[in-house]
Amino acid sequence: MTRIEILEEKRERVYDKINEIESRLEVLSAERKEKQTNVLKKYIDTYDGFKVNYFSDKVSVYVKNGNYSILDMYLYDEWDGDNRSYKRIDFSTSSFRTEYKTGANMEWCADRFKVLSFYSKALADHMDDILAEVNVIAEKYTALNVKLYDKKKPFNQEVREINKKIDKFKDEQMMLKLMSEDGLTIEPKSEDTYLPRFQVKFDWELSSVKSIRGLKKSYSGKSVDLEVAVRRGWGEESKLEVINVDRVRFDNVRAFIRRNEEQIV
């Protein structure tokens, strides 16, 4: 196995540990939502003739067989020190007009006001209880999440360190190929004659780049003198023009190679 393959295998083992923690976080999130939803179900009842959808932080009331809510009750959380807590429940209703006509049955309008009154009273009677119970649940699961996130931090750091090493080895390999006699050549995909652009300087971009070859790298390795072959013209009249570019930032070279690595031979 190469050094890069060894590091990639090690990274996969660390990712397995991260995924295990993230799976536990997903379970905790689902548990929290279910418990908060059950609190809302306990205090906010259904109303005959209307459909009610319960969520972890919202209750929506619909006309039976309707596809839009006539009433929504939202739990809002705010920052309270270092944590967030639920402070209020907002009551939102859709506007409507009766457009009364002589002889029309206005029973639906009376029902609409009855349901609004029913849920207004439910919030007036139970808002404090709902907020208290939901905040107990939120505090418990926030603490559990914090422990898991703290446990995940060193694994995330380990992945970052492994990625740095992998990138370093890839850059070394890239530099060896770049500084070789043949350099790096672009071979367009079948039936595709497009050749890429290369930003060699902040104010200089070469188009239709066919190949790049390193001539000399700086002592720091942060820049390299390049020989760049670009295509001029099309079809049988096309030809390659070789351009020497001094002190191209290696970041630019890396970006060009990674964008076009599938076409580089």
Image (cartoon, rainbow, N blue to C red):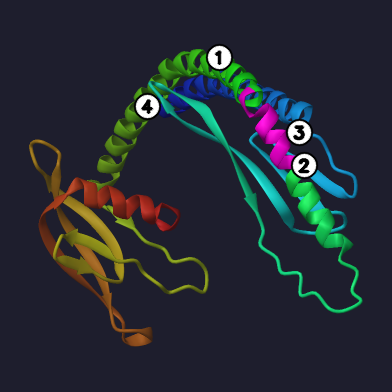
Which three-letter amino acid code belongs to the residue tagged 3? Ile
Residue sitting at 31 percent across and 82 percent down?
Answer: 238
Residue 116 magenta: no
Q: Nearer the viewer, mark 1 or mark 4?
A: 1
Any part of residue 187 in sight: yes
Question: Which secondary structure class fits the magenta region best?
Answer: helix
Between disc 2 and disc 3, whose residue precedes? 3
Towards the viewer: 77 or 188: 77
- Relative to 220, does residue 128 appear above or below in the rendering? above
226 horizontally vs 15: left or right: left
- The answer to whether the residues at label 3 and label 1 have Cβ atoms under 8 Å apart is no
Question: Which residue in the structure is indicated by mark 1?
Answer: 144
User: Quadrant of the image for the C terminus?
Assistant: bottom left
The percent coordinates of residue 61 (x first, y second) are: 76, 48
Inter-mark Cα distance, 2 to 1: 37 Å
Checking the image for residue 197, the label placed there is none
- Relative to 39, does residue 97 appear above or below in the rendering? below
Question: Which residue in the structure is indicated by mark 4?
Answer: 160
Which three-letter amino acid code belongs to the residue tagged 4? Arg
Which three-letter amino acid code belongs to the residue tagged 1? Leu
